[in-house]
Image: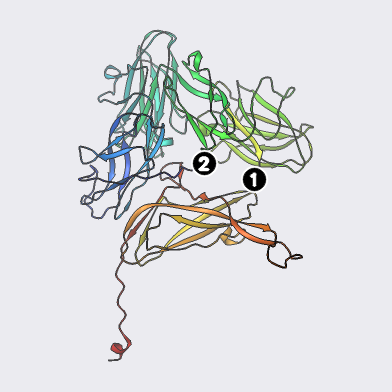
Amino acid sequence: MLKTMMKKSFLLILITGFVLSSVSSISAAVPEIKALVPMGGQAGTTVEVTIDGTIDKEKHPAVWCSREDLTIKPGEKPNQLKITIPEKAEPGFAWIRLHTAEGASNLRPFQIGTIIELTEKEANNELENAQLIEPEMVVVNGILGSGSDVDVYRVHLEAGQTVVANIQANSEMGSPMDGVMQIVSPQGFVIKQFDDNLGVDPLAIHTASEAGDYYLRLFSFPATPNQSIAFSGANTYVYRLTMTTGPYVDHTTPMSLSISEPTSVRLFGWNLPRELHEVTIPASENKDSTKYYHEQIANLVELDHTQYPQFIEREPNDKTSPQAITLPAVITGQIHEKKDYDRFKFTAKKGSAYQIRLTSRSKGFPLDPLVRVLDNAGKVLKEIDDISSANVDLDFDFTFPEEQEYTIDIRDRFSYGGYRFVYRLEIIPAEPEFEATVAATKFTLKGGEKLEIPVTISRKRGYAEKLRFELKGLPEGVSLETPVSEPTGDSSKSVKLVLNSPHDLTASSPLEIVAIPVRTETVPNESPNAENSEPQTREVDGPAQPVVATISGLTQQTSDLWLTAIAGEKPKEEVPAEEKKE
């Protein structure tokens, strides 16, 4: 799961004369964002963003942003926003939502980058009119506007020079395209085609065998397959193409950072100068992950944080010489070549329960992992493959049956291997935990009627604490009924939060739902004459945990929810009993 976005301050801006190009002739429309064009910008610049979507012609929408460091104002044209990004803005996502009195739009991401950004220039469908890319590293913001649209970019390479091109479109940005890239030789021949890397977004790498002008050709299929089996495009087929002949980081060892001390990290990729082969990244306890970036490097590298000891895989570590580790452990490894496999040995106590989690494909690497747990006699105790049909990474719990030495075996499911077949393997204590989710990121409450918000609760590893719920940001006048989720029974799996409001209330505001564990603790009996009394128990609140929802059209989750209150019909006045008799 993507880590829950931190709750940030919000920016509300009334946009005068804001009418979208694709607005249909309807009244009181709830705003919708189909695409932001472009989907990002460089820190230190102001970006004019066109919104493809739907909004009422007579209403002026406001803008909410998950980050307070961006300044958002109306653009020069009715369907534009001007987004000013501070020079020292942290790279990464901002989330944007439009809202009116009628309702709120879906969330859409806006990427803050670190390098020069260009706009794709049509016509660039053929090699002879390919758009020239001259900067050493650049982000091109483009659109595949129709099924016949092909975008071609030209870059000059010297013999032995490497170009890296990465598409950011569907997997993280929600663009409905399944992109394909081709590297074309100076003579016009396709050298190689690149398809899926992170989800369906491709990554292309090519080292020139001779000097000349090479071409990157980009086209698309629909991300959701249909019966056409044809190229596809639309105004919403928006992409960000990072293209560089300079430094680009593919992976690191280790693949995570310690929360307690600085971590020395080796960088691997292409065109990296010697001074960037190894860097030290400070510890940070305030975030779930760190985005590493450098002015010489074209891309960002996101490194998760860990509290557990880290190990780097060392060869040889096969059946005859497994690498010794101690538990708990977080291991960064690599399946170096075809038919390679890695083995690690360790001692575990009888009945000790561990979560074994392997991350690779979800980070954009090609490994399809297969993991086996073996006892000291070589007997396979557990073999595990994919989490699901849509996720080939691994996450399972295992309880060791005896106190002895065990080994864990990691390999590719189809015996592949190579430079990018890297993984992070966590063998960490299996602690009880819970996750609370809702089905949508926005809700509408009509005056005089009830709004029920179902909350689904997933209790893992015997999590047995009561949960109560609070809603932050409720408009004044809205009442709330919040049942408690008990450790057992129907409420352990789901509860319904019930909201009521006066018939004439109107409001549109951010909303956050938090789940709070209710813990029972024992304390001494301090009442008078309690010398021989039993200790007392009392309930105390544990740390609150945000309730999250999956963002529409994306895999990311957010706790940034929205509530719109709409006035309902005025209740009919009760006729006095005396008048009824007459």
578 in relation to 218, above or below: below
Q: Are marks 2 and 1 in contact (CB under 8 Å)?
A: no
Q: Quadrant of the C terminus?
A: bottom left
- Horizontal side of 304 relative to 172 (left or right) equals right
Q: Nearer the viewer, residue 582 or 541?
A: 541
**Badge number at residue 479:** none
Asked where in the image residue 27 lies, by quadrant, the reply is bottom left
Q: Label 1 amino acid? A: Glu
Query: In the rendering, at what x and y percent does residue 101 appear?
Result: 29, 55
Q: Which mark is residue 1?
A: 2
Residue drawn where x is 68% and y is 30% of the image: 409
Q: In the rendered view, how is the structure colored?
A: rainbow
**Picture residue at 30% right of the left edge, 68% below the top:** 569
Q: Mark 2 is on which residue type? A: Met
Q: Nearer the viewer, residue 231 or 254?
A: 254
The residue where tag 1 is placed is: 431
Q: Name the outermost residue toward the front.
A: 528
